[in-house]
Image: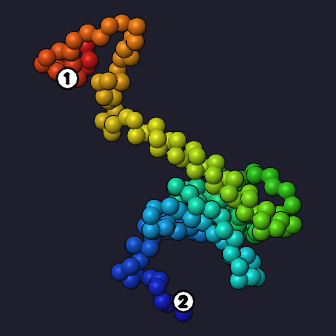
Amino acid sequence: MEGRGGGGGGDGGKRKSERPYKGIRMRKWGKWVAEIREPNKRSRIWLGSYSSPVAAARAYDTAVYYLRGPSARLNFPELWVGESVGNLHDLSAASIRKKAIEVGARVDAVETSVNVHDHHTPPSGFKPCWFQEKPDLNKTPEPEDPDGDDCVNGGI
């Protein structure tokens, strides 16, 4: 069964873009979800739904590390170097879920705040005119230039 779906099929590139990291997938509406199968069981541990694939992958990494220890195959192994973790094998599925969701939510918050700040500045690096100077709200507004050349001249 291994030969099915893998290799150089026409759909291989599409699957790679849908799942850039192990243990995650994208919902139809754009959210990224993570889950992992419990060792020696048919059940899965739900690891949450996230805005970014990185957050979902970090949640997966947390869970797989707690399940399989230092030999786990991680999406971001460089982030676990020197990480001290308590007793790995005595964790229940609920506690693994909780730890994974904490990490995923934290990464999602950082990713989301970075994306929000990036959207305020256009790709050219220049800010729109109305950001360049803050008006004094105690002054009476002055009439605008009828030519409307303020933005062209840098708002001066």
The quarter of the picture where residue 124 lies is top left
Crowding at mark 2 (Cα within 10 Å: few <14, some 14-19, many 20+): few
Disc number placed over residue 152 in the picture, else none: 1
Q: Earlier in the sequence, mark 2 or mark 1?
A: 2
Judge whether 11 appears above or below 91 on screen. Answer: below
Q: In the picture, which quadrant includes the C terminus?
A: top left
Judge whether 149 appears above or below 73 on screen. Answer: above
Which of these two is toward me, 146 or 14? Answer: 146
Judge whether 11 appears above or below 19 on screen. Answer: below
Q: Is residue 134 left or right of residue 99?
A: left
Which of these two is toward me, 117 or 14? Answer: 117
Crowding at mark 1 (Cα within 10 Å: few <14, some 14-19, many 20+): few
Residue found 85% across the figure and 56% down from its top: 86
Residue found 17% across the figure and 20% down from its top: 149
- Secondary element type, mark 2: loop
Q: In the rendered structure, which amino acid carries the disc numbered 1?
A: Val
Disc 2, disc 1: CB below 8 Å?
no
Q: In the rendered structure, which amino acid carries the disc numbered 2?
A: Glu
Q: Position of residue 112 (x, y in %)?
A: 52, 46
**Total residue callouts:** 2
Which of these two is toward me, 83 or 155? Answer: 155
Disc number placed over residue 2 in the picture, else none: 2
Colour mapping used in the image: rainbow
Judge whether 3 appears above or below 109 on screen. Answer: below
| View extreme (bottom): residue | 1
| View extreme (left): residue | 147
Is residue 73 shown to the viewer in this render? no
Q: Position of residue 59 (x, y in %)?
A: 65, 59
Q: In the picture, which quadrant includes the N terminus?
A: bottom right
Residue found 70% across the figure and 59% down from its top: 100
Q: Position of residue 29 (x, y in %)?
A: 44, 64
Q: Is residue 52 left or right of residue 71?
A: left
